[in-house]
Image: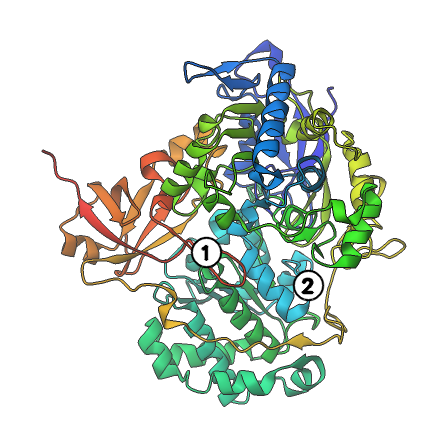
Amino acid sequence: MTRPADSHCPYCALQCAMTLTPTDAAADAATPPVTVAGRDFPTNRGGLCKKGWTSAELLRAPARLGAPLLRGADGALHEASWDEALDLVATRLRGIRSAHGADAVGVFGGGGLTNEKAYLLGKFARLALGTSRIDYNGRYCMSSAAAAGNRAFGVDRGLPFPLEDLDGASTILLLGTNVAETMPPFIGHLAGAQAAGGLVVVDPRRTATARLTDEGKGMHVQPAPGTDLALLLGLIHVVIAERLVDEAYIGARTVGFDRLRRSVASWWPERVQSVTGVAALTLRRLARRLASGAGTYILTGRGVEQHVDGTDTATAAINLALLLGLPGRPGSGYGTLTGQGNGQGGREHGQKCDQLPGYRKIVDPEARAHVARVWGVDPDDIPGPGVPAVELLQLLGQSGGVRALMVHGSNLVVSSPNVDAVRAGLERLDLLVVCDFFLSETAALADVVLPITQWAEEEGTMTNLEGRVIRRRRAITPPTGVRDELWILAELAGRLDCVAAFDTDPERVFEELRLASEGGIADYSGIDYAMLDRGDAAYWPYPRGSAGTPRLFAERFAHPDGLARLVAVSVRESARPRPGDDEVTLVTGRLLEHYQSGAQTRRVPELLDAQPEALASLHPATADRLGIADGDDLEVANHRGAVHVRARLTTDIRPDAVFLPFHYGDAQAANLLTSDAVDPVSAMPEFKTNVVRVTRITSP
Ligand code: SF4
């Protein structure tokens, strides 16, 4: 195969468009098999970030796995044939199932899988394994925003409008998102708001995104970590108190205003100031700016969502947007920025423990009957709801819990909260099977590792942060020893004597997905590969015969009565512990050079050289108080564990906080310190505000 292929980046949800041109890699083992060039597309306009530019390095990285690995009697992993590996997995799964029941087998998926893989993985879990216990790493990313969107709007699409709509904005409020580092080409869409002096960034750190507000381009608001909900309740209070509410919109398009009004009555700006540290005057100025006219957008990210009160915080942001009449109004809106490459599609096709394809509820008899018809089985053959990710991991190796786990597209011992407990659970299993292209920290614990194809070697579809379905195209032939996960699932289903059909051709799997999604919330029935190959914009819901839905909510919301819900939420004082005198709050997040658990980007030399280790960012005043100098070796610890990193002193962080990136494993894994307490609505763990002690490690 030598022709260039138009495809998209393997990493984040912006899914920047690329052209992949095959090279003569055989001439030089160090030459990547494709060159990557940015391609003009409405989201990235030809731009790529460092990760995208270097993504070809992933394809022939020296650490790439080239054959299945089985753990031998000596405790080491040894290469094996595909038949040996698949026969072993099927035999062990059968044995565990018959000894402990179908729910003793768990499946953990990922938000980076193509739509076709995510769909087939959900089907495989329910029909080939017969287990209810499937969930995925999107639980760590989008679950709070999704839960808030579903209860307010009746639907969860990250951006309910095309990204280009932001170009015309005069005010954009970014709540807890660092797009300048996580998806740099995105910032091109902020230029209009910057020019109007209306870019507002809420973040406890002075991030690269916060710096975009300098020189009169907007405002950086720096609340204390974990106080976003109080800040939003204060903004809502001011909007109501100063009669900035769009009353016609509230009357015609929402329910719940009176209860909401009563719920924020006591959140006057001075009280908010005492909780968040944000000046009352700043709060009032911000509320007035948001209400100052057309062209206002409110966007949330993981900074405000990855909390035990993440759903309520995202709900408060939606309440604010609704009070201002933004959702569905041309040139204005509310949205949440999906992070993982297929974080949107990954939550629509049945990987979630409570869902069937089409974003259907698994407990809904009509949904079960519809999907059962497509799958050619009886509705009773589809297990009921399982448990969300954190609970699934807490069941590993427990009596009556999960004895075998299949992992696809996740590096659990880096990305999960309280990773020491997760590692212990994985070590208790009778069988751990990991599909990956590198020996990630999780794969290194597995009994069986199955090496898989990568983005430039496969066909499929992804759904980007706008809810736009796009094509991933094959530019090169995969290495001989690796296999596509569709093939792996079909082979295992056959070995497990599953009666349902498992296709291995991505386009035919997509055709089945279309049928399964038809009539659901995320309806893909009107989308096919031919139209995507023509370059047609395909936004779901896209019912058969329609033109798709680039913009949602223009006339009605997705609840049966067409109205949005204003949901009164409140601050739970007990939601999180507060730091004592000798403690600070740990804030976790991402760096420009790395993606998620770093399993991929730490294998790219240019990216690893730029950010080779986790550094703990501390304010100089805090460092001074703790006797720490720049570059000192530190222990950052709490009752869950300890991380060993070096200090980086910066005034970009508040004195009451320490920042750690979460891309690193082993002794630098930030998630050694994070809590597996979860949000009661979304089951999102608390990644963003955990109490730690920081101490300098002195030489013996
Ligand atoms: Fe890839 Fe995201 Fe960077 Fe674009 S912004 S090149 S999609 S990592």
Relative to 669, is 557 on the left or the right?
Answer: right
**Residue at the image position 78 percent from the left and 49 percent from the top:** 379
Is the residue at mark 2 in contact range of ligand 1, meaning its CB lies under 8 Å from it? Answer: no
Q: Position of 499 compared to 225: left or right? A: right
Q: Residue furthest top?
A: 27
**Is disc 1 surrounded by few (<14), some (14 to 19) or many (20+) residues within 10 Å?**
many
Regarding residue 505, the answer to whether it shows in the image is yes
The disc labelled 1 sits on which kind of residue?
Answer: Thr
One can see residue 332 in this view: no
- Residue at left 69%, top 46%? 41
Q: CA distance from mark 2 to mark 1?
A: 29 Å
Asked if residue 558 is positioned above or below residue 388 in the image, the reply reads below
Q: Is residue 71 above or below residue 358?
A: above
Residue type (three-letter) at the residue carrying disc 2: Val
Q: Which mark is residue 174?
A: none
Q: Which mark is residue 155?
A: 2
Task: Please state which of the two labelled residues, at mark 2 or mark 1, is closer to the viewer.
Answer: 2
